[in-house]
Image (tube, coloured by chain):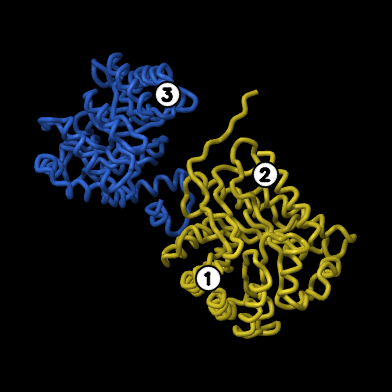
């Protein structure tokens, strides 16, 4: 499983504060902590409250680069912020994300080609998120087609079937799982699949958030999920993930399999 | 028809053995000898086995190649390198076994020094399969060979701590051995690694069976190990060693059939393990060594 650490996001109070006060240590600590917990890439999002998103994105990326060359997932909907972020990356970047709107796809897939980036494609468009798997698959097909049109390998596309919070859209979880399964048939090489995991428990009671996250993640693993944006510092979540991958024969059993997983 | 070439995400560790003329093994990014999948950065190597005492159980057809040298490990090792072009020497300290000569650590250390002096190719050193005695002698020998960057064996799940500590402090590599069990092989590597032993100094050995004696089990375990390694399992991304020669020469066919049967048995066994991913083949008969070295160079040139 390709793990993208979610914590460097201006929606979190500590990150927002760090951006405002230009406090590098908070960001660098978060970066290193997530890497030590097994992140393969870090999501970077300046948050909605930022007054100057370009400046904040540049500062965040440069701050992280001082301590690590890890891959970054540039998380913004703004084209100019995205391009600036991609241009600053040392390792192959990830675009987070594009939706299935024509104009959005045209600008973001061009950027993916120009910067040799992987790209996360959301199965949503102007009319929102489809309620079922069939609707999501239609949009997924559009994203795959765009990928081909711009000459990007289809396995550089990470399809995100967009999970909604279970407390408001309970019927979506099983549709997302079906989409993860079915997406593999859209192209050869098959597109990858990703989830913004924590969204599933948004608004649920704090006590159960982690339980909901790890339960849904194991279900997604069983359906073939390739990557997730998640809280890698949640130890129980990571243990469930390692065990799910073990049961799916994604990693070989040994007595200390959790330890082996952490050393990956 | 379009050819499908598999792209693997990871790489087998490169392990360097030896000091005077060091060799590098491992480094695979795909399955060797599949045209287009891997360019064989470090072709598999052939080690020849040298004992610290005359191997009485060996058949004459094998012994006769070495004649008097069988009684002098240093001369024997030199002969294997100069005359038979061995890439490495595997010194088996058989005589230390309590049921054989029960040779002391000091004596074994002296033999090792002589062999080290006689050759410049890298050295693999293995014990006598007596866990307690091996621990005692290997700890001493690791120290004697300090700085020579040898490959010491064998660590097992029941007995790995002493050898791991000795190799760690003297800077040697280690052979981790599991009884044809990939899960134990992985677990043992974790245990060794927990002692702060560097991953790029571990070589895996899956207990070997000869042709007709369980070869297919070891073959498939080695293949699975290699595929797991290049698929990103860090605890299995080590090069592998195979003691195929000794197994071939242990068979009744090699010992009792026509003169060339043993050689053919060894060649057949070794070619199979070559294809299953062995990075070092420990062999015995000069004729088989010659054939296998020829096969390696032809297979690697093709890629």
Coordinates of residue A152 in the picture (x, y in percent)? 42, 23
Residue B160 horizontal side relative to residue A111, left or right: right
Pointer 2 and pointer 3 on the same chain? no
Label 1 packing within 10 angstroms: few (<14), some (14-19), many (20+): few
Chain given the colour yellow: B
Coordinates of residue B144 in the picture (x, y in percent)? 56, 78
**Does the residue at mark 2 contact the one at mark 1 (Cβ under 8 Å)?**
no
Residue A76 horizontal side relative to residue B252, left or right: left
Of circles 2 and 3, the one toward us is: 2
Q: Nearer the viewer, residue A246 or B295?
A: B295
Compared to residue B230, the image places residue B195 above or below, namely below
Q: Which of B79 and B38 is in front in this view?
A: B79
Which mark is drawn over residue A152?
A: 3
Compared to residue B43, the image places residue B151 above or below, namely below
Of circles 2 and 1, the one toward us is: 1
Q: How many marks?
A: 3
Label 3 packing within 10 angstroms: few (<14), some (14-19), many (20+): many
Residue B169 horizontal side relative to residue A121, left or right: right
**Residue under mark 2: which chain is it in?**
B
Q: Mark 1 points at which residue?
A: B147
Q: In which quarter of the image is the N terminus of chain A?
A: top left
Q: Which of B62 and A160 is in front in this view?
A: B62
Chain given the colour blue: A
Of circles 1 and 3, the one toward us is: 1
Compared to residue B259, the image places residue A96 above or below, namely above
**Does the residue at mark 2 contact the one at mark 3 (Cβ under 8 Å)?**
no
Coordinates of residue B20 in the picture (x, y in percent)? 60, 65
Under circle 1, the secondary element is loop
Q: Is any part of residue B179 visible from this angle?
A: yes
Q: Name the residue under label 2.
A: B300
């Amino acid at each position: 499983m390709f793990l993208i650490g979610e914590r460097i996001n201006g929606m979190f109070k500590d990150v927002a504060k760090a951006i405002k006060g230009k406090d590098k240590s908070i960001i660098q600590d978060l970066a290193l902590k997530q890497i030590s917990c097994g992140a393969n890439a870090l999501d970077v999002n300046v948050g909605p409250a930022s007054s100057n998103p370009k400046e904040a994105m540049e500062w965040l990326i440069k701050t992280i680069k001082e301590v690590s060359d890890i891959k970054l997932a540039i998380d913004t909907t703004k084209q100019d912020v995205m391009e600036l972020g991609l241009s600053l990356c040392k390792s192959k970047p990830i675009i987070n994300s594009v939706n299935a709107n024509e104009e959005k796809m045209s600008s973001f897939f061009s950027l993916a080609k120009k910067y040799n980036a992987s790209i996360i494609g959301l199965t949503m468009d102007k009319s929102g998120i489809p309620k079922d798997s069939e609707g999501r698959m239609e949009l997924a097909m559009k994203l795959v087609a765009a990928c081909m049109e711009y000459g990007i390998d289809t396995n550089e596309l990470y399809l995100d079937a967009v999970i909604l919070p279970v407390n408001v859209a309970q019927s979506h979880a099983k549709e997302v799982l079906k989409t993860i399964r079915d997406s593999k048939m859209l192209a050869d090489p098959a597109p990858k699949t990703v989830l913004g995991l924590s969204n599933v428990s948004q608004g649920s009671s704090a006590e159960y958030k982690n339980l909901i996250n790890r339960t849904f993640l194991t279900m997604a693993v069983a359906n073939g999920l390739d990557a997730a944006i998640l809280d890698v510092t949640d130890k129980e979540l990571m243990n469930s993930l390692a065990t799910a991958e073990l049961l799916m024969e994604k990693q070989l059993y040994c007595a200390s399999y959790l330890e082996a997983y952490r050393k990956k | 028809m379009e050819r499908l070439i598999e792209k693997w995400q990871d790489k087998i560790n490169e392990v360097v053995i030896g000091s005077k003329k060091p060799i590098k093994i491992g480094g695979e990014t795909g399955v060797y000898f599949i045209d287009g999948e891997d360019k064989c950065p470090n072709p598999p190597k052939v080690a020849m086995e040298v004992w610290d005492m005359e191997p009485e159980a060996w058949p004459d057809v094998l012994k006769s190649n070495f004649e008097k040298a069988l009684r002098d490990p240093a001369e024997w090792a030199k002969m294997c390198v100069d005359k038979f072009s061995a890439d490495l020497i595997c010194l088996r300290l058989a005589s230390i076994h309590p049921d054989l000569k029960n040779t002391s650590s000091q004596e074994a250390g002296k033999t090792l020094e002589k062999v080290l002096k006689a050759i410049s190719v890298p050295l693999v050193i293995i014990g006598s399969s007596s866990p307690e005695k091996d621990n005692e002698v290997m700890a001493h020998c690791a120290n004697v060979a300090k700085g020579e960057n040898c490959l010491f064996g064998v660590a097992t799940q029941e007995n790995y701590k002493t050898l791991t500590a000795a190799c760690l402090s003297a800077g040697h590599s280690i052979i981790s051995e599991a009884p044809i069990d990939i899960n134990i092989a992985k677990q043992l590597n974790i245990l060794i690694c927990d002692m702060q032993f560097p991953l790029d100094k571990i070589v895996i050995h899956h207990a070997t069976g000869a042709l007709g004696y369980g070869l297919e089990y070891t073959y498939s375990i080695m293949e699975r190990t290699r595929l797991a390694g290049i698929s990103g399992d860090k605890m299995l991304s080590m090069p592998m060693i195979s003691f195929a020669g000794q197994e071939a020469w242990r068979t009744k066919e090699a010992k009792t059939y026509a003169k060339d049967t043993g050689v053919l048995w060894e060649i057949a066994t070794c070619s199979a393990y070559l294809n299953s991913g062995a990075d070092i083949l420990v062999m015995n008969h000069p004729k088989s060594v010659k054939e296998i070295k020829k096969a390696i160079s032809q297979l690697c040139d093709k890629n």
